[in-house]
Image: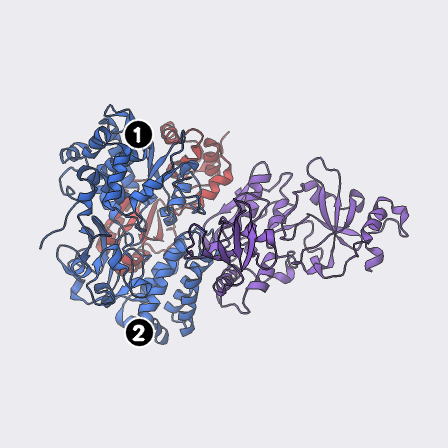
Amino acid sequence: MPEITIDGQKIEFNQGMTILEAARSKGGDLVPPTMCYYSKLKDTGGYCRTCIVKVEAESVKNPRALPKPVASCRTLAQDGMVVKNQTSPEVLEARAGVVEFLLINHPLDCPVCDQAGECSLQDLGYEHGKMDTRYEFKRREFEQRDIGDKIKLHMNRCILCYRCVKTAEQITDGRVHGVCSRGDVAEISTYIEQAIDNDFSGNVIDVCPVGALTDKTFRFKNRVWFTKPVDAHRECPKCSGKVRLWYKGEDILRVTARKDQYGEVEEWICNECRFEKKKTADWVIEGPSKVDKHSVISANHYLAPEMKNDLSMLILNPDAGNNPGSSPFSKEQE
Amino acid sequence: MHSQIKSSKGEMKEIRFSEATMVKVREIIARYPEGRHKSALIPVLHLAQAEFDGWLSPEVMQYVAEILSIQAIEVFEVASFYSMFNLQPRGKCLIEVCRTSSCWLNGAYDIISYIEKKLNIKVGETTPDGKYTLKAVECLGSCGTAPMLQVGDQYHENLTFEKVDELLENYQQGEKMSNYC
Amino acid sequence: MKEGKKILLEHIDVPGIEKIETFRACGGYQSVEKALTSMTEAEVVHEVITSGLRGRGGAGFQTGTKWNFLAKPEGVPRYLVCNADESEPGTFKDRYLMEKIPHLLIEGMIVSSYALGVNKAYIYIRGEYFYLYKILEKAIEEAYKAGWLGQNILNTKYNLDLYMHIGAGAYICGEETALLESLEGKRGNPRIKPPFPAVAGLYGCPTVVNNVETIAAVPYIVNHGGENYASFGTEKSTGTKLISASGHINKPGVYEIELGLPVEEFIYSDSYCGGIRNGNELKAVVAGGSSVPILPKHLILQTPDGQPRLMSYESLSEGGFAAGTMLGSGGFIVMDETASIVMNLHTFARFYHHESCGQCSPCREGTGWMEKILHKILDGHGTLADIDLLWDIQSKIEGKTICALGDAAAWPVASAIRHFRSEFEAYIKDPMAINKISHYNEKYKIAGTAI
């Protein structure tokens, strides 16, 4: 099996994998951060330049170093390749530069942004950015555009990762939004404020790494870290029906797809599941979600795993509980 | 049923290419392999801009999308990317003055401010009578004959104030502007 | 003074050379006859490899090598696309060539297409060159009528269709993959490579993209042989190159030079630029189009080790980034003592900001930031820290972007600071000082801010 070395660690990989995929197969700190790459979509990545790494040796056959850093998400791993990520000061400096570029025009409205707490850009800034900003000019502002009653577009926050465009292209039956204009005034837009409206359009919310596309039905309802994620499912004729419910007390404030450790959707969900099923009775509760380390809600204050079975019992058979009809959290959490 | 737009003279006009233009459209589409008709988008947008008052209204873009059987958003993405497509109405005579390096070295800014004063408008504006729009643009590949400006597809090179006077006078007299397509 | 070899512009002054009859009478289309009737495709490629011809668009990559890379899977069409999207500030040679002698490009397209096994070829021309589009359309029509294009050319069963394709104002479409996207009717966003066009280019098929001047050199190479071509110029820079000369010189224009000509001779000789206007002093030169590093007088005329600097790929780059530059597209912009380096740089920074496609973050955000800082300095509000900030921003763009536009935006900034830092400092310390050497400041305020 071919082997690649990343930050001194040898990793076996399958031919055809990118450097990033090889790194993720090992996991840990050697995995480069990503903002635009999305493993669940085809043909993503390469735009944000966050995942750049240094190639010290290209392959066994050609052991020369590459002169420029490469985007690990778009560069194929090769046998004998030697890559530096966290161990290269040059990469860390370049990445800090990318973070700065992504932030100079990004509004500092985290206090009122629904993405706060689960925002990839916040995490990136925290982990790879610098303390101060050196940008002293007015931040870019776009005109507000209405793209329908379910999805809120906040163009000022967009980092042009193209994920939502690829999502619309690949999992919906007709893309009605795209990237318009060019350069630093390029923006996500529909054609003359047409609504993005089809059964799977809501997935653009889940793929957005920042708060540029948010759920209007959740808007300003609560801070993410005060809500509690629970995995649940239902029989859905359109999608897998496997979702994550976000509770506040007994109310489901938000429904999203389930996400993996890299914050990527595990299975796409339909708009009906996402926007219209907000009662506990709509769902079969599986138990509290395992939340990725990146989320502020991952702090260790959820139900112990052994509670899971009792919980599903509780939901499937409300009479079994002491407090019929209440949310699965009502006892333990309050 | 095609939509209508208001022409520069104020009357409503149906958005539909003339038969002569349609012949051109078909000829352009035929340049590309079967199924690759989207390649014709930029040339067809030029034809549309020339035919429908020098700019691309949402209705015109919709019409082009229909002709090429593509989504309107695909047309909009492209039309908004390229600097020669106007998404707003503009004056009949679009004056584009180059201002990059060599033109700047040879006094392009003087030419720009001269035209600004003469037409009593700023860069980016249109005269109240809708006749002239002044734009400052980036390198037009006329560096050896700087300073220069472009009107329609005509290059006016080695400009002096006198030359500017003369060419504006000619356009004022209604000299036919050699247009795209 | 002995004039150098003329390969491209030999017949440029023949009256009526834009017409096919005149062109033919001057030996035009001979290379098509020779190649199609007496050479195999591989033999033509071989001659181009032997010639040492390098891409004339800017990168200077070996044309023969590029052709050799072209994948040739069975049953898949291949394309040749001519890059006539000339937009690099300071460059206007392709325009001159296409306007004066359009059939030379068409001849080159036919013989190159034959060599590459291509049956459908396109010339992608920038939208602003619409009048040239008309000239070339007419020339193509003439070539079809004369049987140089179409089916069964010269009864050899070789078929070729050649079409014009017009752009609409985007410098980035000069980048070959952005050009292909644009030709497919999309936004001019450069593609992420690999795959390279030689494997998956236009419509996903193997494609070669070559600059106008590169293609136009092929007929000579076919007619006279690669070795003959390589006998001109220097070892690493064979043949001739069109140089677009502009700025503060007495005789701006397009010159065909034999590569290896001393820079000093090019600037001061009456056969070329004819010296600096008004008898002024030479201050600086941008030798290969806006993207390449600017050099002050002492470094453009001489290499760091005191040898005369020559107009060739290798001599101009001697000294690396610290003291050298590049031949690039051959856009030769000359500045005399009155020119403000800071203001010239601002026009470049504005240009790259305007032309960034916006796909990748360092270029999208960095080009605008650099322009804003330069604008601030020109407005008299700069601080000395701004110079270091500019330096740092350009270093964080360079080499970190999808395509070369990032580098192209970074290098002019880096070189201006490297060689003219004192001018930035002087400007910042005494903003009015610029008015003492240049009268442009007031005009700048009027014209430089809008759009």
Callout count: 2
| Image quarter of residue C113 | top left
Q: Is residue C19 above or below residue B81?
A: above
* Residue situated furthest bottom in the rendering: C429
Secondary structure, mark 1, is strand
Chain letter of the residue beneath label 2 in the structure image: C
Discs 2 and 1 share one subunit: yes
Numbered mark located on residue C433 in the image = 2
Q: Can you identify the residue that label 1 sits on?
A: C160
Chain letter of the residue beneath label 1 in the structure image: C
Colour of chain C in the image: blue
A134 left or right of C162 in image: right
Using the image as rendered, state which of residue C3 and residue C305 is in the foreground: C305
Colour of chain B in the image: red
Q: Which chain is purple?
A: A
Q: Amino acid at mark 1?
A: Leu
